[in-house]
Image (spheres, grey):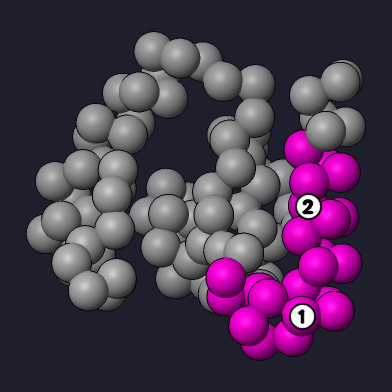
Amino acid sequence: MFWRPPGNRKPDPVETATCKPFVERLIELSKPKVIVLLGATPASTLLGTSEGITRLRGRWHDWGGIPPCRPSTRLSAAPARGKRDAWRDLLAVKLQLEA
């Protein structure tokens, strides 16, 4: 989605299904070298999986993307580990962009 729903709630399936074709078309038109999906909702939607974000993060997926955790989620759960994981994800993005 292009925005967070009111009350900072998770988008419902109708909202996600409504926005998904626009996001896919935007990706198709812009042909990005790297896609960074911040959090479980965008990762599960674009990857078509129910696998948790902690299992998905840190791995490159065939569409050229990496799904790190949302910064607020990672930092609130375990600040030291969250910073370390976020830094690793950002370094992976940097290396991919330089390749």
Can residue 32 be seen here?
yes
In percent of the image, x 57 and y 70: which residue is there? Answer: 72
Q: Position of residue 27 (x, y in %)?
A: 42, 25
In percent of the image, x 45 and y 14: which residue is there? Answer: 30
Q: Provide the secondary structure element on which disc 1 rests.
A: helix
**Circle 2: is it few (<14), some (14-19), or many (20+) Cα within 10 Å?**
many
Q: Is residue 9 left or right of residue 48?
A: left
Q: Which residues are magenta?
A: 72-93
Q: Main secondary structure of the magenta part?
A: helix
Q: Is residue 60 magenta?
A: no
N-terminal-most mark, 2 or 1: 1
Q: Is residue 63 above or below residue 92?
A: above
What amino acid is found at the position of numbered circle 2 in the picture?
Asp
In percent of the image, x 18 and y 67: which residue is there? Answer: 6
**Relative depth, front residue between 82 and 41:** 82
Q: Which mark is residue 55?
A: none
Can residue 49 be seen here?
no
What residue is disc 1 on?
79
Q: Is residue 48 above or below residue 65?
A: below
| Label 2 to label 1: alpha-carbon separation | 15 Å
What residue is disc 2 on?
89
Dividing the picture into quadrants, the one containing residue 92 is top right
**Relative depth, front residue between 76 and 19:** 76
Question: Of the residues tagged 2 and 1, which is closer to the observer?
Answer: 1
Q: Provide the secondary structure element on which disc 2 rests.
A: helix
